[in-house]
Image (cartoon, rainbow, N blue to C red):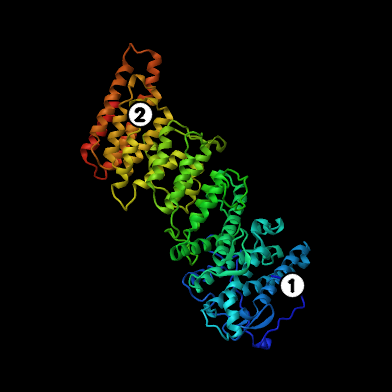
Amino acid sequence: MDDDFGQSLTPPVSPFMPEDVCEPAARPPCFTCAYEPGREDAHMLPSDGYVSRGVLKRLLLKLDPSPTDFEVDTVDIFGFPWVTETALVEYTKLLFGLFRQKVFRLETLVQSSSHDFSQASGLHYEAEELRQQCVLFLTYIKVFIHRFLEVPLPVDEGFVHPYCELEAQLPSALVEELFGITLLIGRLKDLPANVQSALTIHHQGRLFPPSWHLLHLHLDIHWCVLEILHLLGQKMMGQVVYAHQFVDLTGETLTNVSLFEDHLNNLLCDLIIVAMNKYSKVRPTETLTSNHYYCACTKELWIILIHLLEHRSKTQHTQSFWGYVNALLQVVLKGVLPGDRDPGLPANCKDPLGFTWWLITHLAQLGMYNRNGTLQNEKQLEDNWSFVLELLKSSCDMKVAVPEEQMRMLVHCCLSLNLMWGSNVSAVNTLWEYYSKNLNGLFSVPWLGVSGLGSISPTPLTLLEQAKSCCSPEPMTSASHAQLYRSANSFLIFLRMLALHLSQESAPGAPWRQIKGRIYSKFHARRMAELSESGLHNFLLLFLVLARCGDLEDAAGRACDLLSLLVPRSVPPTLCALQWRGQLALLLLFGGHGLDLAPLASKLSSAFTDAAREFYLKTTEPARRTALWHPLSTYLEGTAELWQTTHTLAARHIPSAVFSLVTGLLFQAC
């Protein structure tokens, strides 16, 4: 740390070996987002990255970090030959000094680079060479720890070989030097704007400016520091390694454990800040299509952090990935609590609640990648329902009016989490508590135009089809799921969650028993009388979903009993028409299952007869007669639709009694 290295430095390598005897330096794995045809469409990670090259997998399996490299007696690092098995012990400070020298040189290139295209090629290759030398050195450290480092053992007083003494000090020296590197490069959030802007360079060329190489070298260093500290902890078999000359930024003695924790929290915090900057430009309609990272490198960094932290949680009983992230997100939501360390998150986040939902959903999507970098259908990362449920409760706080545009986004995110993690009954119940109190809502987003307006299904068949569309949620990766914000309101998205919960195959019957009591208990005579046209439409959709995904006869029977609480004389004609439309949709559902329509049909037929008699009475006022025509015409059109649909089904061996009953309804309507 106190050494100053100049450009003319020649390291005292011992023993000296001619350059042609040294092992040629192989290109080490590193972060890169250079264009690769078809990579994004196939959801693949960069081919030269840490995941595709097997670095992550070997780390988790405790295998050699780079099995085909550093296998000869000497290795070329920073342009000089070194003895492979002893260099890091004998020349620790010298090697790290050369490393800092290369970083400084790359920073100088960034500061002095111009927009002269004639220099682009030379600058690119020089910057790339500097970066490769630095990454190669970091790879050498990992290999040295795995192959050559011996755990220091207590020795008797007396003569100790100088090399053994140096080797015993290496773990502490590494902690000191790694701490120095973290101070040297600083944090991602503090990088100059021209370097941070390299995150957004997405072109198909192969020549990049020095700022691009410097940024990606920072990403390499941040990851390698964590990887080296993890390997060191494994090699030391749990012994805490203390730094002799330094204390950490809190004034405590610096150890490999404290350095890992501090560096990890700083890195996660910086990645969250990058995500915040991205979120500030995300429209609500792009919630699922706009990722929280700018390039494939930061995507890969998130993935390897997920797997490393989950591995450490299981093997060393440390915090899980979600444990670290949740603590930082709590700061985003509530600010820094008194007595807690400030992680450096900005206090001016746009919509902290929406950002948290957005980030958790996208991190859960990255949690679907396995350690080989392949996107799986099953989660690889444990769920985070405990945090999400608390987030959901605060999002649905009835004391604060939640606008539909925000509610639609969070329910969309919640549905996505259900698809990835499996359904959660508490999430369904929390949302039902919200919607049971807001059933009359229009759930429209005016600035979306026509697509954001709610609509009442004009026929029984369209009402049933709308309910059916909620019963088969599309896969997470489908375009229709990503566009749900535009095509469905928040209540319809909630119905998809409800259907997903009721359709669980792991516990037949149990989800229905869990949910039906909570839903049924919210409806009684007073509540039914309070329903507006949109409220009754939502009620019908709810029970059609319950009937289709739960117990058909139970849900249909309860729906009809509740609809009978609506007093015909006191119900506006538009509500009466909608009521009959819903009952006809239930008849369509019964007919599709080949069940007896008589119990439901008789109630509907009786109501139609009463309305028709009133319509034909000469004493009925013209205004009343005009009003009655709306539900009567709805019945006639719906019955014809029912007959046509059931007639088609009758050709598929629907019992003749059912077909005769529907035909009788049509004759009566005529």
Q: Which residue is nearer to you in this view: 667 or 91? A: 91
Cβ atoms at labels 2 and 1 below 8 Å apart: no
Residue at screen point 61% across, 54% down = 274
Q: Is residue 583 visible?
A: yes
Residue marked by disc 1: 4
Give residue 263's position: percent from left, percent from top. 59, 61
Image: 333 above or below 155: above
Q: Is residue 243 left or right of residue 615?
A: right
For mark 2, give the secondary structure.
Answer: helix
> Which quadrant would residue 657 be assigned to in this image?
top left
Q: Which residue is nearer to you in this view: 499 or 612? A: 499
Residue marked by disc 2: 579
Type of residue at label 1?
Asp
Give residue 221's position: percent from left, percent from top. 62, 66
Looking at the figure, which quarter contains the N terminus?
A: bottom right
Q: Marks 2 and 1, how far apart in space?
A: 84 Å
Type of residue at label 2?
Gln
Image: 670 above or below 402: above
Residue at screen point 23% across, 32% down = 599
Give residue 388's position: percent from left, percent from top. 46, 48
Image: 644 above or below 174: above
Residue at screen point 65% across, 83% down = 82
Pointer 2 local density, CA inside 10 Å: few below 14, some 14–19, many at least 20 = many
Label tally? 2
Give residue 430's position: percent from left, percent from top. 41, 41
Q: Is residue 341 left or right of residue 499?
A: right
In the displayed image of the protein, which residue is found farthest to the front? Answer: 157
Mark 2 / mark 1, whichever is N-terminal:
1
Q: Is residue 500 left or right of residue 356?
A: left
Q: Is residue 39 visible?
A: no
Mark 2 vs mark 1: in front: 1
